[in-house]
Amino acid sequence: MSKKQRKHEHEEHMDESWLVPYADILTLLLALFIVLFASSQIDQKKFEQIKMSFQSALSGGPSFMDNVSPVPSRDNVGIDNEGKREKDEQSASELEEQLRKKETEQLLELKRKIDQYIDENGLTTQLETQLDNQQLKITISDNTLFASGSAQLKQESRALAGTISELLEQYPSYEVVVSGHTDNVPIKTSQFPSNFHLSAERALTFMAVLLENPDVGENRFSSVGYSEYKPVASNDTAEGRAQNRRVEVSIVRNIQ
């Protein structure tokens, strides 16, 4: 009888009811980690949706997985970012092109005004204008402005400087560079030891007259002397040397 009883006791099984809540805890932990992972990669609105779905799941409602949209893969995120970058670059390029077109229209308008002044005053052989991708350039022959070897502006040229200054006043957003140029014939006087000194002084003199207009905006002006080193013609002929002796007023583009 005792042997039979002992055998019966060995056949008894342990209570495994604890496995059920343990499995529930593991499920909840898994759900929590999924939520934390998902919320780290989506925006606040998505997070609120997940939180509400998770609360509903804990209270016996639908699973939070029914409401959460899948997190985009890293490949998709990369494609989306690349597409956005290309779109931004295209928009920036289109905006720059629009600004360049507007700038060209403004400089063409200024060029027409100067050309009209040149025609009305018979200055076609002494002044010319040229618009390119860098600037609107006004070229003035030196004999229009100065006597030979001098940096003192002729009195009759002050009206020309005044007109240019008044026109520049209407376009205040552009930098203006006044540059002086000579031919390659050396000069050496007590006032001008070299062509650099002469070209720089002529540019500074003409700029100073432009700045007599108080409304032209002197903070956007500068002057430079290039001596003989930026010729526009050959210095082997008298005609070429005459073309090289000049003052240039450059209205510099903001968008190049």
Image (cartoon, rainbow, N blue to C red):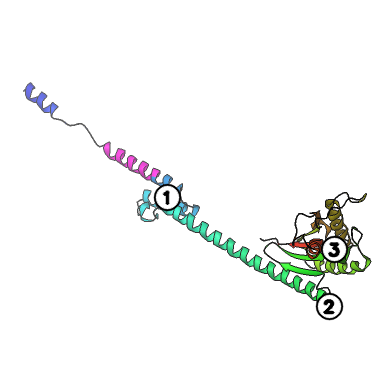
What secondary structure prevails in the magenta region? Answer: helix
- Quadrant housing residue 131: bottom right
Image side of residue 219 versus residue 55, left or right:
right
Q: Check disc 3 and report its element: helix, strand or loop.
A: helix
- Where is residue 21 shown, x and y percent of the image? 30, 39
Q: CA distance from mark 2 to mark 3?
A: 20 Å
The residue wearing badge 1 is 74
Q: Check disc 1 and report its element: helix, strand or loop.
A: helix
Q: Tell me the residue at 44%/50% (across/down).
A: 51
Q: Is residue 194 visible?
A: yes
Q: Check disc 2 and report its element: helix, strand or loop.
A: helix
Q: Is residue 61 visible?
A: no
Q: CA distance from mark 2 to mark 1?
A: 69 Å
Q: Is residue 113 above or below residue 89?
A: below
Is the residue marked by circle 1 packed among few (<14), some (14-19), or many (20+) residues within 10 Å? few
Q: Which mark is residue 120?
A: 2
Mark found first going from the N terminus, 3 or 1: 1
Which of the two discs, 3 and 1, sits closer to the camera?
3
- Where is residue 92 shown, x and y percent of the image? 59, 61
Residue type at mark 1 is: Arg
Q: CA distance from mark 3 to mark 1?
A: 67 Å
Q: Tell me the residue at 30%/40% (across/down).
A: 23
- Viewer-closest of 25 and 106: 106
What range is drawn magenta here? 17-33
In the rendered image, the quadrant that contains the N terminus is top left
- Viewer-closest of 172 and 6: 172
Q: Is residue 25 found inside the magenta-colored segment of the image?
A: yes
Q: Which mark is residue 142?
A: 3
Mark 3–mark 1 contact, CB under 8 Å? Answer: no
